[in-house]
Amino acid sequence: MTAHAPNAPTARPEREIRSILVVGAGLAGFETVRALRDHSFAGHITLLGAEGIAPYDRPPLSKELLARTTPAWLTEDQHFDLEAAVDDLRLGEPAIALTVSDRSAEVTTSAGTYRADAVVLACGARARRPAGWESALTLHTAADADALRAALGTGRHLVCIGAGWIGGELAGVARAAGLQVTVIEGAVAPLGPILGDRVGGRLRPWYDALGITLELGMPVAELTPGRVLLRDSRAVRGDVVVAAVGARPATEWLVGTVPLAPSGSIRVDGGYRVLDLPPHVVAVGDCVERLSARHGWVPGGHWDAALRGPELAVRTLLGVADHAGDPSTDLAPYVFSSQLGHELTLTGLPRRGDDVVLREDEPGWAALYFAPQSRRGPRELRAVLTVDRPRDAAAARRMFRGAALPIADPRIAADAARDLRDALGQ
Ligand SMILES: Cc1cc2nc3c(=O)[nH]c(=O)nc-3n(C[C@H](O)[C@H](O)[C@H](O)COP(=O)(O)OP(=O)(O)OC[C@H]3O[C@@H](n4cnc5c(N)ncnc54)[C@H](O)[C@@H]3O)c2cc1C
């Protein structure tokens, strides 16, 4: 079986799909069911989940960790009655095996085997916890949030390993609640592996301003309950230790059936078809790495892709051809985050070695990541980070809708008094 080109026109399936299995009851699984019914799919839907509770939204788990004690249920937030839409809802029955044949797919759980004409893999990711770090808490599920809330309720000092998106959010929330907070980061800047050291370094004063101790460039040598030993032999003690060192796709049950990237992601084409598998297998959300015509391989891991990807995956599955060739359906990577009192968005994918141009004015600033080029003048813009600049955030999202990366003039882009889109080549 050959892989499809990114955003290849959707072909009408050769046969009618009458039953669909959706694996994963997170945002992507929820939105898949909604999209199926929105497209008048009248067949049988089975939804398998692993957490034993209804789908909920994850961003509030960190942002509102201490303020809200119940999950933000998707049925309420997204105004869609999941229970009424699904024929067979099994929220506490994780899939353990997948078998794909030419005309159907079978998913096995501890309770039985389910067969359908098509399968949507939406099994998301899990928090990473390196070997030997078993005593550290993580923050990925509602159950994790309950455990962490309880621990912070009695604790006085939070030690958070990782100054990434979630580590930064958690540190801010804990500090605002009056806890002493230490953040330990192996890279030399907060969010350095994503934003680069220069831009990530601009976040450092935010930690200082809130009185958070930030240890940078400091890998953890050993972790025992309540004690983190640093590579330079210093020990940091805290009554709550959290590992916020990223997530890994929850795809171990697919090893041997689905070709996986080294990251553990399921590779999909622009139409969310799983590479090297028949077209009745699609995947979406945090478990995938998608081939974008504009950005190359786009890793999962962000809310917007789990919200909007399912509609496109469902169109592929059902053969709804109305988006064929429309570059705006090639979703640009988009992350939003509240870091230590600042609102951040990142649109596109920065790459190591990009030329970074700053756009500064009160309030906030933006960093523009340009493809390196020896001559001056307009060039490919790969990503835009905005900090407390909602207008630039909205402009950036509109700039990444074309068939290719936008060509922009760095000189004009740096002028914060002008609309960001003035920098686009004519
Ligand atoms: C604390 C936190 C804060 C976040 N904040 C932001 C933010 O501010 N901005 C942003 O862009 N993104 C944020 N994210 C990321 C965003 O929430 C995710 O990208 C999104 O939830 C992905 O949805 P998903 O459905 O693909 O995966 P998931 O939400 O991981 O859902 C997948 C579901 O599948 C289940 N599952 C796994 N394996 C199996 C199996 N074998 N069988 C059946 N079910 C299975 C899992 O238990 C899970 O319930 C945050 C994530 C976390 C954890």
Image (cartoon, helix red, strand yellow):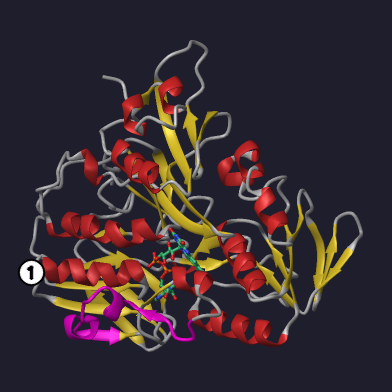
- Residue at (27, 85) in percent of width and height: 89
Q: Position of residue 31 (x, y in %)?
A: 26, 68
Q: Where in the figure is residue 290, as x and y percent of width and height? A: 37, 48
Label 1 Cα neighbours within 10 Å, binned few <14 / some 14-19 / many ≥20? few
**Which residue is located at x 33 percent, y 79 percent?**
48
Per the image, label 1 sits on a secondary structure element best described as loop
Q: Magenta stretch containing residue 21, yes or no?
A: no
Instruction: Please say whether residue 299 is visible from this viewpoint.
Output: yes
| Residue 14 image-quadrant placement | bottom left
According to the image, label 1 marks what residue? Answer: 40
From what the image shows, is residue 352 above or below residue 282? above
In this rendering, is residue 113 above or below 190? below
- Image point 49% across, 80% down: which residue? 142
Q: Is mark 1 within 8 Å of ligand 1?
A: no
217 sits left or right of 39 in the view: right
State the extent of the magenta-drawn residues as a range: 68-89
Q: Residue at x 66, y 43 (%)?
A: 201
Q: Image height check: is 349 above or below 311?
A: above
Magenta stretch contains residue 83: yes
Q: Nearer the viewer, residue 260 or 8?
A: 8
Is residue 17 visible to us here? no
Dividing the image into four quarters, tell me where ligand 1 lies. bottom left
Residue 36: % across, % down: 16, 68
Q: Which image quadrant is residue 377 in?
A: top left
**Which residue is most to the right?**
233
Q: Quadrant of the C terminus?
A: top left
The type of residue carrying mark 1 is Ser
